[in-house]
Amino acid sequence: MATTACFIIVSRNEIPIYEAEVGSAVKREDAAQLHQFILHAALDIVQDLAWTTSAMFLKAIDRFNDLVVSVYVTAGHTRFMLLHDSRNDDGIKSFFQEVHELYIKILLNPLYLPGSRITSSHFDTKVRALARKYL
Amino acid sequence: MIGVGKIKQYSNVLDKPLSKGKQEVSLSAFAFLFSELVQYNQTQVDNIAELERRLEDAGYAVGARVLELLCHRDKGNRRETRLLGILSFVHSTVWKVLFGKVADSLEKGTEHEDEYMISEKELLVNRFISIPKDMGTFNCGAFVAGIVRGVLDSAGFPAVVTAHFVPVEGQQRPRTTILIKFAEEVLRREARLG
């Protein structure tokens, strides 16, 4: 089943530190920019919502046509945002939790500056594998 | 060869499980490392304020990571959104993991609304350090103040955190107080959240 999905990690200071198109559908030319635009627009909503709950998984917070934005906020206010068209809440939650563990391992590296871009290709491979598994 | 067990070789740290880690670290190893850290920074700066700032920055990096790791490991992925919540998190969980015991006390400042103090009879990092008279009010607890600032800042509660010696009668060594002064926006948000 072909799905469109765009995954972005945004740091505390609103700077994207990782992005990946993880859907299995065929990509249109302008799809990538549109996806990023939608995700950035949803950032404001996340800001307010994050302070109202102590849970990390914020479920679906915004819609655009048939695409849904789901967000997961970590303790350090790093946001994992997923733009997708499926309704698989549990799969998405597990995906976020696994990526969260990977993110913590990257963060524990004393030479990694928190808030800077994640450039590890191994991290990229693992995220894509997780996306194929859960989404 | 006798006794060679089959150890799983991990090619990358991302594949290793995020374990609970060793619960105990050698105190002498830490004291040695910390003293080297202070001595190294001493050679790089020419005044005390700069030295304190460098120790604080070193602690800040630790604090940011400790927050994420502990929230994931010990708190089952619950974030702290309230002021008292994050303060008691620092006072108990962070202190327990870093120093093996909860902090001695957590008090609210009487003069200002935005000040809180965490006190400790003897900070672990200061145990083997004595300050010469000509360094005045310098406190190596600036490292711990940096850790607290890292935790609070990453959690969305920006604050100015400093470490002070407070003399106590009846005790030879003064106790250390970590003074936390929160920024305006934190108090405004707290009031808004009710």
Image (cartoon, coloured by chain):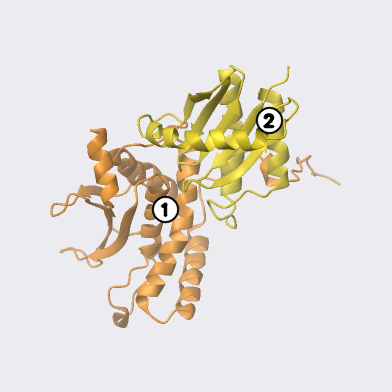
Chain colours: A yellow, B orange
Residue drawn 53% across and 27% down? A70
Please rate how many residues cluster around mark 2, counting C-alpha atoms within 10 Å: few if below 14, some from 14 to 19, many from 20: some
User: Whole-percent x and y of residue A89?
Assistant: 56, 19
**Residue at the disc numbered 2:** A130
Chain identifier of the residue bearing label 1 in the image: B
Give the left or right position of residue A107, taking residue B190 as reference: right
Is B80 left, or right, of B191 in this rendering? right
Question: Residue A44 location in percent, x, y?
Answer: 43, 36
Q: Which residue is most to the right?
A: B1
Q: Secondary structure at mark 1?
A: helix
Amino acid type at circle 2 is Leu
Left or right: A60 in relation to A31:
left
- Does A88 sit above or below residue B163? above
On the image, numbered disc 1 is attached to which residue? B150
Across and down, in percent, residue B126 comes to: 37, 65
Q: CA distance from mark 2 to mark 1?
A: 31 Å
**Count the marks: how many?**
2
